[in-house]
Amino acid sequence: KAFSVEVTETTTGRIVGGLFGTLLHGRVSAESMFHLESNASKVGLVYFFGQLKTQGVKFVDTQMVTPVTGMFGAREISNEEFLSL
C-alpha cells in the first residue's frame, strides 16, 4: 500500500508539506518528504509516527539518515539487523 501525509495551512487549506511512502506487511518505507513552509514536513512526521505507534509499527526504513530523520532517532544499522527486522 502507498501512503501520503499532507500538512495543510489552517486558514487556506493549502498543502505546505508532507511525506509519502509504502506500507507492506507492517513494514514502512518512507520514500520522500517535502515542504513549502519551514518545519511542515516535520509536523507530518510527528503525526505519521504517532499513527504508526498506535498500530504497533516499531520500525521505519528512512533509507538514509539526514539531519531531520536523525532528530527523530533514525540511525544506521547493519544489513544483518535490517534483514532481521
Image (tube, rainbow, N blue to C red):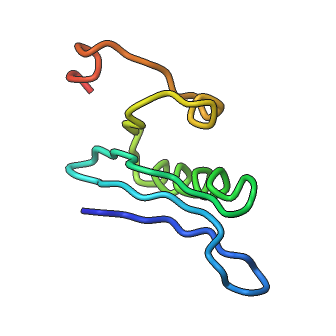
Q: Is residue 24 left or right of residue 59?
A: left
The residue that appears at 43% across and 65% down in the rendered structure is: 4
The residue that appears at 59% across and 28% down in the rendered structure is: 70
Q: Residue 19 at what x, y percent from top left?
A: 49, 57
Quadrant in which residue 13 is drawn: bottom right
Q: Residue 10 at what x, y percent from top left?
A: 76, 80
Q: Quick check: 80 above or below 58?
A: above
Pick whichever, 66 or 80, lies toward us.
Answer: 66
The residue that appears at 33% across and 46% down in the rendered structure is: 28
Q: Is residue 16 left or right of residue 55?
A: right
Quadrant in which residue 15 is drawn: bottom right
Q: Is residue 50 left or right of residue 80?
A: right
Q: Quick check: 58 above or below 32?
A: above
Q: Residue 5 at what x, y percent from top left?
A: 50, 65
Pick whichever, 38 or 57, lies toward us.
Answer: 38
The residue that appears at 49% across and 48% down in the rendered structure is: 53
Q: Indicate the quadrant containing the N terminus: top left, top right, bottom left or bottom right.
A: bottom left
Q: Residue 83 at what x, y percent from top left?
A: 20, 23
Q: Indicate the quadrant containing the C terminus: top left, top right, bottom left or bottom right.
A: top left
Q: Is residue 19 left or right of residue 71?
A: left
